Image (spheres, rainbow, N blue to C red):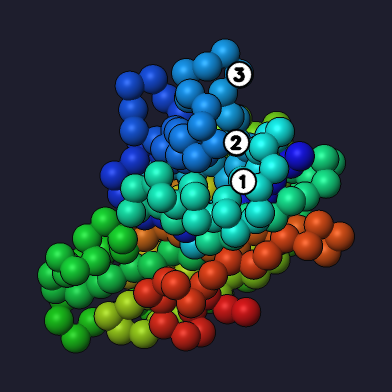
Amino acid sequence: MRIALGLQYDGSSYAGWQVQPNQLTLQGELERAIAAFIGESPDRHAPIQTITAGRTDAGVHALGQVVHFDTHVDREMFSWVRGVNSYLPKSIVLNWASEVPEDFSARFSAIERTYIYALHAGPCSSPMVSGRAGYVMLPPNTWFDIDAMRVAATYLIGEHDFSSFRSSECQSKTPIKTLYSIEIISSEPWLYFRIRGNAFLHHMVRNLVGTFLMIGRGKRRSEWMAEVLAAKNRQMAAPTFMPDGLYLAKIAYPEEFAIPGPWLKNSWFPDGVIGD
């Protein structure tokens, strides 16, 4: 049978999602936990292999990651949740499990994804959110130009070639993606970016955030975003911003698969940031 799982995790201590030699990874920890729960060695010839909706980078977190895997083991769905969680570190939590059709793919069946970037700004950083939020130093009694960033966001909505915001290591077959919405939520000393699209390029959200912050700090005008987008040149955009505040928040699927939504109330985000 094919099983889908919903995960939350703090990615601070991991070298990203994907298994890498001699590295602590989220995929590696999950697959070891599943193998331990069903009583199979993770070193056997055909180990458990999970397919994920989004291969998050080192230091990136998730509120609503979705994965699937195939197994001959038949257990109650809540037994998967309780059992696998007993073998996972506290930084990774399985929220739900669901049997899905064989044609379901956590990656290829997804129709849209939502990322949230959480930013803390002010004269000094906070150790209470270290590793879980980005940070920008601002002098006392100053704040970002929120209106300018919101104007800049309008240039990105729709289908575009996002090569200017694409990592050189990106493996996507095409730089053409569609952004459905970008919301910028200001609540000093916090700033949140909520970006929803059909798919994203490697480092795309972090490169967008870095570019937004150049505009928000008055170093560039709003129209610069349109110029960067049109250039299709990574050198035109701002440097890649830190991973600390990036969260894979939601993955949406066709209703026919009946995939549960993420347990968003388990997060520390205030009401109104994550959305419905």
Q: Quadrant of residue 257?
A: bottom right
Q: Nearer the viewer, mark 2 or mark 3?
A: 3
85 horizontally vs 197: left or right: left
Residue 46 got which mark? 3
**Count of labels in the image:** 3
Q: Residue at x 79, y 45 (%)?
A: 104
Residue 7 got which mark? none
Going from N to C along the chain, the mark reached first, 2 or 1, is: 2
17 horizontally vs 144: left or right: right
Element marked by disc 1: strand
For label 1, the crowd category at 10 Å Cα-Cα, with few meaning under 14, some 14 to 19 and many 20 or more, is many
Residue at image mark 2: 50
231 horizontally vs 41: left or right: right
In the rendered image, the vertical position of residue 48 relative to residue 274, given as above or below = above
The location of residue 276, given as percent across then percent down, is 62, 79
Q: Residue at x 20, y 75 (%)?
A: 122
Do labels 2 and 1 touch, CB within 8 Å?
Answer: yes
Distance from disc 2 to disc 3, alpha carbons, whole Å, reads 12 Å
In the rendered image, the vertical position of residue 133 relative to residue 65, given as above or below = below
The location of residue 137, given as percent across then percent down, is 20, 67
Q: Quadrant of residue 158?
A: bottom right
The location of residue 261, given as percent across then percent down, is 64, 67
Residue at image mark 1: 67
Do labels 1 and 3 touch, CB within 8 Å?
Answer: no
For label 3, the crowd category at 10 Å Cα-Cα, with few meaning under 14, some 14 to 19 and many 20 or more, is few
Which amino acid, by three-letter code, is at mark 1? Answer: Val
